Image (cartoon, rainbow, N blue to C red):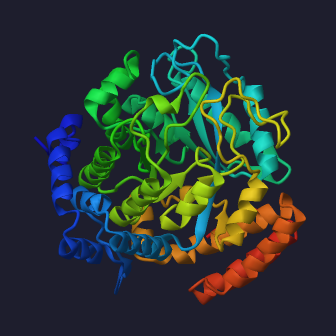
Amino acid sequence: MYDVKSLKAEEFINHEEILETLEYAEKNKHNRELIEEILEKARPRKTARGTECRGLTHREASVLLACDIEEMTQKMYDLAREIKEAFYGNRIVMFAPLYLSNYCVNNCVYCPYHYKNKHITRKKLTQEEVAAEVIALQDLGHKRLAIEAGEDPVNNPIEYILECIDTIYKIKHKNGAIRRVNVNIAATTVENYHKLKEAQIGTYILFQETYHKESYLELHPQGPKHNYAYHTEAMDRAMDGGIDDVGLGVLFGLELYKYEFAGLLMHAEHLEAVHGVGPHTISVPRVKRADDIDPDVFDNSIDDDTFAKIIACIRIAVPYTGMIISTRENESCRDKVIGLGISQISGGSRTSVGGYAGYTPDVRPHDTEQFDVSDQRSLDEVVKWLMDLGYIPSFCTACYRAGRTGDRFMSLCKTGQIQNCCHPNALMTLKEYLEDYASDDTKRIGEELITRELVNIPNPTARAKATEYIENIHEGKRDFRF
């Protein structure tokens, strides 16, 4: 039985409810009147408190995804852009993954880290190697990391993860500092989530991979990840452990995308219903080639047009949630979808353990990669590309350090006040990047963008203060924030 407030995985991600939703969506995919009503419901509205969006239920959003009327699809794209602009403006947050260890006891059939893979090089970073990786990332200009590790209670216990986080935060190199560490590790206990919270992590990220239980069990035949309920209920334990920013995601291509889409939105609805705040981020990775993984063996792959529509429909359905796209996607795909709701991207990424230190930007180690990096541009190239498109690359981490997480962040976002802190914070952190790391061409374009964008800060006091801070950054001072 479907129950959005249940704490049992098979009740808040209910198979029968998803099947009924897909049947309803298929039946109504050409119902223009209903589709127009759904789009109108999702449209941003000005209120006394600011701009507000109602979002959509998983069933309403599934109708939009199923609709194949070209005119309506274009309306969805236009609405997705409008919603993204209303709540996140033209800012794109930058981050990089940092792989700590590829030791893993699971046997996931889509991941080269599975324990049966005997020819991949197994590696676990020492704390000295972690420090070297952090310095290399700081020298690129990164301020926000997402740490990754396989599931292995012997090689990668929670104590190791916590030690790595502590090392990362302690490294200060030249003007560099990692100001926020997001964590993407296996499902764990409330006690361990509490330890991660005490370690001052940013967002806890865990991909479901697939919400289809039967497929999930086949894709995870051995190891602790085989436990569908324990994995699916992890976000509830994380929130019980005090982590109020969590990130969802499925690995598109493992199961039929319409099923995954409905399950993903049901999970978001569940978190909102039970904890009062939905996911802080939603990621949309697709299955990619890796060491002994051939994506062609999975028969549910989706083309770029379908991928773009999924992103637009997620943005419409969950308007306040950040959306992440990684370097799994190539430059042309990222260019196609970034305007449809994406608010965070990775740049200059390496998906190998120890992939940054000791390597030049054009040399990539492949022996420990989790997947092929499709967008192999440097961080500087990605920053310039974003600015050429009219976006502000943001290295901001202020909300985490100011305690604006969970429902406090969502309240700020929903009332529109985010523009008076996030917009100037984005400009100030971009200024830091330009001063310390950018190429001459990127710096020139960035300085022009900052001059243009300062006038778009709504509050005159905040605008004046941001202008002052930016001048201070030019003079050598760092780490101003609203």
The residue depicted at 41 percent of the width and 60 percent of the height is 309
The residue depicted at 60 percent of the width and 63 percent of the height is 92
Q: Residue 97 location in percent, x, y?
A: 63, 41
Q: Residue furthest left?
A: 1
- Toward which corner of the image does residue 319 lie, by quadrant? bottom left
The residue depicted at 54 percent of the width and 44 percent of the height is 201
Q: Please say whether residue 398 is visible from this viewpoint.
A: no
**Which residue is more in the foreground, 386 or 273?**
386
Q: Residue 177 location in percent, x, y?
A: 74, 49
Name above or below for residue 317 compared with residue 149. Answer: below
Is 266 positioned to the left or the right of 414 in the image? left
The residue depicted at 48 percent of the width and 34 percent of the height is 195
Name above or below for residue 162 compared with residue 316. Answer: above
Name above or below for residue 21 compared with residue 482. Answer: above
Q: Please say whether residue 295 is visible from this viewpoint.
A: yes
Name above or below for residue 113 compared with residue 241. Answer: above
Image quadrant containing the C terminus: bottom right
Image quadrant containing the N terminus: top left
Q: Residue 355 location in percent, x, y?
A: 74, 33
**Which residue is more in the foreground, 92 or 221?**
221
**Which residue is more in the foreground, 170 or 443?**
443
Is 285 positioned to the left or the right of 350 in the image? left
Q: How many marks?
A: 0
